[in-house]
Each structure stands twice: as structure tokens, then as C-alpha cells.
Amino acid sequence: DHEVAKIPKKYLKNFRTQTKQVCFPFDPSIIPQITSLSFSKAISSCSTQQVSTLSKSPILSKMAAPISLYLLLLALFCQTHLSFSTTGPAIDHSRPLSISTSDVHDLLPTYGLPKGILPNNVKSYTLSTTGDFTIELESTCYVQFDQLVYYEKKIKGKLSYGAVHDVSGIQAKKLFLWLPVTGIEVDENSGMVQFFVGALSEKLPAKQFEDIPVCKGNAFLRADLASM
């Protein structure tokens, strides 16, 4: 059965024997009670037989013209309303979207960063709409790049396209000192990744960070150093 609008009770007294149900509300005051969707279905469900039933009543025939005009305007309004409601907001494809992946390594390339700047033992991460992020590792560990790099269990910073600033939780060993890594920037033209370590900076080829590195604990690190 199609969803239709009931005739208000004040009309049923005179016309109960002529029709029990019509496709249109006669009283304009009840129109706001009908949703645009149900109204559209009611209009589309009108059959030739129902229209001919209405035409048999003299009083209903006199009301047909204003009702038809009313329905035409409402139909146009409903179609316009539905078309606007189904149109989504415009998306700026020049900027990365919010979090849509459970793996932070897959997120990094969408920001122009190599996935290998983070180790393989990432447990979880959060990223706000302003770019602030927190990454939690399974445990603290070390990765041997050109220098030995230490990752704390929790890493924080601010992410933007091609760069990470205000980093905390990463340290690099320079000679006998452990210095904080405070930022990372990618130079796409030269294919280099620049690391800001303390008051210094160093550029390394981006190819070194194409693969996700295996993060090793202290025991593995001591074994590797002993074998050198």
C-alpha cells in the first residue's frame, strides 16, 4: 500500500461515502505535518481511478483547481528540498583528509612523508583536525639509520603536508650525546629528508625511508653492536 494523507475529520462527514482516501491534504494547516518524502510518495501514488473518484463530487470538483495549484508548488518544493539535502559538502582534494586508515604508515604518504620514518611496532595513534598527533609504540626501541635513533613509547608532534614539527619522543645519537629530534621536513625537489636534531640539521636520501624499519630492543641492540 502506498503512503497517503488522510482527509481531516471535518471533511469526512459529507464525503465518507464518496471517497475514503485521497492523495492530497485539503487543509493547508496539516501540510507541515507531512514529510517531504511521504508527500512525494503520495503524489506518485495517485492513480487515474482516485482522480476520477474525486471528480464525481461537485464540492470536490470545485476544490480541484486550487488544490492542484497547491500540489504543484509543493511538489516543486519537495524536489528542490530533496536535491539540496542529498548534495554533500565540497571536498578540498588539495589537502589530506582526516584519519581514514588504522595504520599510521599508510597515512604518512598522504601527507608527503615517507612511511619509514616510524618503526614497525606502532600500537595506536590519534590525529586531530589541527594536525596534532600522538603515536604509541608497543615498547621503546632503537633503529639504526645513518645514526642510531631511539624511539620512546609515546611520540608527539604536529603534522602538516611534507613536514612534522614540535616533535617529542625521538632522539638521535651524535657522537656520545643523545639529542632530541625536533622536526622532519621533506624536500620533494631534491628527494631528501631533512632532520632537525638539537640545534643541527641533516639531510638524508628519502630512499632510505621507503621501507618500514624493524625496531629493536636493548638486547638486540647490544648483540648488533657486539658483532661490529
Image (spheres, rainbow, N blue to C red):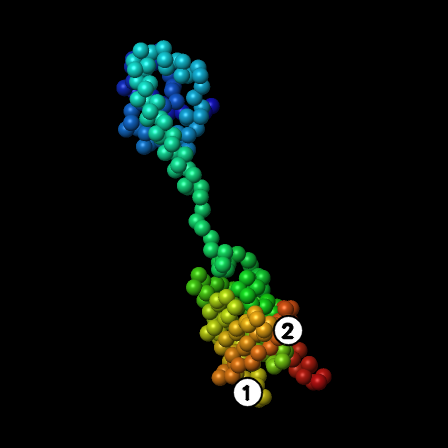
Please name whichever residue, 83 or 60, is drawn nearer the observer in this view of the structure: 83
Q: Residues within 10 Å of mark 2 (few under 14, many from 20)?
A: some
For label 1, the SS is strand
Q: Residue at x 45, y 46 (%)?
A: 88
183 up-or-down from 176: above or below: above
Name the quarter where the C terminus is drawn: bottom right
Q: Nearer the viewer, mark 2 or mark 1?
A: 2
189 vs 227: above or below: above
Amino acid type, residue under disc 2 in the picture: Gln
Q: Going from the N terminus, do you reach mark 2 or mark 1 first?
A: 1
Q: Position of residue 96 (x, y in %)?
A: 50, 60
Q: Dot 1: within a 10 Å radius of its alpha carbon, few (fewer than 14), some, or many (20 or more) residues? A: few
- Kindly identify the residue that appears in the image at 32 percent across and 29 percent down: 31
| Residue 157 percent coordinates (x, y) | 47, 71
Q: Is residue 74 left or right of residue 128?
A: left
Report whether 37 appears left or right of 119. Answer: left
Residue picked out by circle 1: 177
Q: Amino acid at mark 1?
A: Leu
Residue at the spot 48% in from the left edge and 67% down from the top edge = 160
Q: Residue furthest front?
A: 189
Image quadrant assignment for residue 132: bottom left
Circle 2 sits in a helix, a strand or a loop, which is it? helix
Q: Nearer the viewer, residue 32 or 44?
A: 44
Q: Outermost residue, right direction?
A: 227
Where residue 203 sits: x, y (%)?
A: 57, 78
- Residue at 63 percent of width and 69 percent of height: 210
> How many angstroms separate mark 2 from mark 1 (CA)?
23 Å
Provide the residue designation for mark 2. Answer: 208
Relative to 36, is 141 above or below? below
Q: Is residue 142 visible?
A: no
